[in-house]
Image: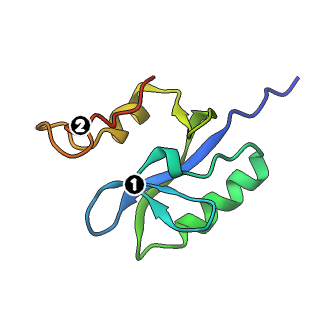
Amino acid sequence: MPRSFTPKVVTGNALVEGDVIYLAADDSWTRELAGAEVLTDEAHAQVRLLEAERRQSEIVGAYLADVTPRPGGAKPTHFREAFRATGPSNYRHGKQAQGQAPEL
């Protein structure tokens, strides 16, 4: 029996700044997980990933990350994604200082 598909978002890092970015439904990049397009169909998720990988002048390391859909935006299902969403870990600034770190 095939396993059910876990909802995902397309993520990677901005080519120039290195920030974590997410693909939004309007094909723009957002630095907020809440603005990411939540993909609930496996075939559509693969297509969106391929589209993101072709945008090599904007993003590096594109991949699909598991999320849990919820009102107000997606929630990461894995510690790694929650950690990435908080920004750099070498000192408290940016999203960490603003209290925008997503919960697990």
Q: Residues within 10 Å of mark 1 (few under 14, many from 20)?
A: some
- Is residue 72 found left or right of 12 in the rendered image? right
- Nearest the viewer among 41 and 32 is 32
Q: Secondary structure at mark 1?
A: loop
Callout 2, which amino acid?
A: Gln
Q: Element type at marker 2?
A: loop
Is 65 situated above or below 63?
above
Across and down, in percent, residue 15 comes to 33, 67
Task: Note whether 64 is above or below 50 in the view shown.
Answer: above
Q: CA distance from mark 1 to mark 2?
A: 13 Å
Marks 1 and 2 in Cβ contact (< 8 Å): no
Q: Which mark is residue 31?
A: 1
Quarter of the figure with residue 47:
bottom right
User: Where residue 12 sits in the image (x, y, percent)?
Assistant: 43, 54
Coordinates of residue 33 in the picture (x, y in percent):
47, 45
Q: Local crowd at mark 2 within 10 Å, few (<14), some, or many (≥20)?
A: some
Residue ID at (11%, 37%) = 91
Say which mark, if any, is on residue 71.
Answer: none
Counting residues from the start of the chain, the first of labels 1 and 2 encountered is: 1
Q: Residue at x 58, y 35 (%)?
A: 66
- Quarter of the image for residue 50 reads bottom right
Residue pointed to by mark 2:
96
Identify the residue at image location x=74%, y=42%.
40
